């Protein structure tokens, strides 16, 4: 798929809709599109057969006709310098169906961020195995981007902790009973 701001994009095949989140400084440092408040793009992609990807919502809720998804959203912006390290963190909370993201230039401490509620547009994926990808690209008007480090942390749902709690309680009670029996047996001898 080709995007006027992002250039040529590869959108993988999937039987389910998925999210593409992109930090794109060009929105505020070169493109200056009317209505673009920030440097983030969020797209809901459908590509079940691998040959005809569609990006929704269409038209864009932020920029209207001619655009797809939420293009140029968020607040704050910066133009990274040559050799700058950029920290990017994106979090999806399925319990609230909300995405948040922050990009920080570690050389200048400047940042760009966004928060987007997807209710009415995207349904949280079912629990189970989910796949994610991270990448960087060189656009026609951009620097040569590269990924240096990736850290993935799954969200621990309180239901999982709640389902383990009774077993932990039983284990603690058993340990206390065993210690008590050992102490009582030693005193008898």
Image (tube, rainbow, N blue to C red):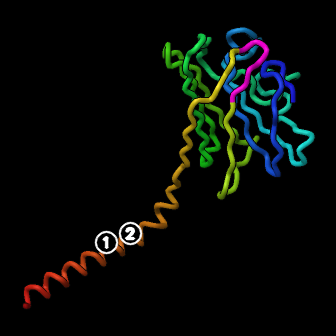
Q: In the displayed structure, would residue 162 be above or below residue 67?
A: below
Within 10 Å of the Cα at label 1, are there few (<14), some (14-19), or many (20+) other Cα atoms? few
Quadrant of the drawing holding the C terminus:
bottom left
Magenta range: 136-142
* Prevalent SS, magenta region: loop
Find the residue positioned furthest to the bottom: 189
Residue 69 lies in what quarter of the image?
Answer: top right
Q: Residue at x 79, y 50 (%)?
A: 16
Which disc number belongs to residue 130? none
Between residues 104 and 137, which one lies in front from this camera angle? Answer: 137
Quadrant of the drawing holding the N terminus:
top right
Q: Horizontal placement of 95 versus 138: left or right?
A: left
Residue 132, x across and y down, in percent: 68, 44
Q: In the displayed structure, would residue 92 be above or below residue 157?
A: above
Label 1: which secondary element: helix
Which disc number belongs to residue 168? 2
| Labels 1 & 2 near each other (Cβ < 8 A) | yes
Residue 64 lies in what quarter of the image?
Answer: top right
Residue 140, x across and y down, in percent: 79, 14
Between residues 184 and 148, which one lies in front from this camera angle? Answer: 148
Q: Which residue is mark 1?
A: 172
């Amino acid at each position: 798929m080709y995007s006027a701001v992002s250039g040529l994009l590869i959108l993988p095949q999937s039987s389910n809709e998925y999210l593409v989140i992109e930090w794109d400084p060009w929105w505020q440092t070169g493109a200056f599109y009317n209505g673009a408040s920030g440097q983030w793009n969020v797209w809901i992609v459908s590509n079940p057969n691998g040959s005809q990807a569609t990006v929704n919502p269409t038209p864009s809720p932020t920029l209207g006709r001619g655009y797809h998804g939420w293009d140029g959203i968020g607040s704050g912006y910066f133009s990274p310098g040559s050799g700058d390290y950029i920290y990017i963190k994106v979090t999806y909370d399925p319990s609230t169906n909300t995405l948040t993201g922050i990009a920080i230039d570690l050389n200048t401490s400047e940042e760009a961020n966004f928060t987007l509620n997807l209710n009415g547009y995207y349904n949280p994926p079912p629990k189970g195995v989910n796949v994610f990808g991270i990448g960087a690209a060189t656009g026609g008007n951009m620097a040569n981007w590269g990924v240096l480090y990736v850290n993935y942390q799954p969200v621990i749902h309180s239901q999982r902790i709640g389902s383990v709690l009774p077993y932990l309680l039983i284990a603690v009670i058993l340990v206390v009973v065993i210690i008590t029996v050992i102490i009582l047996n030693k005193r008898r001898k």
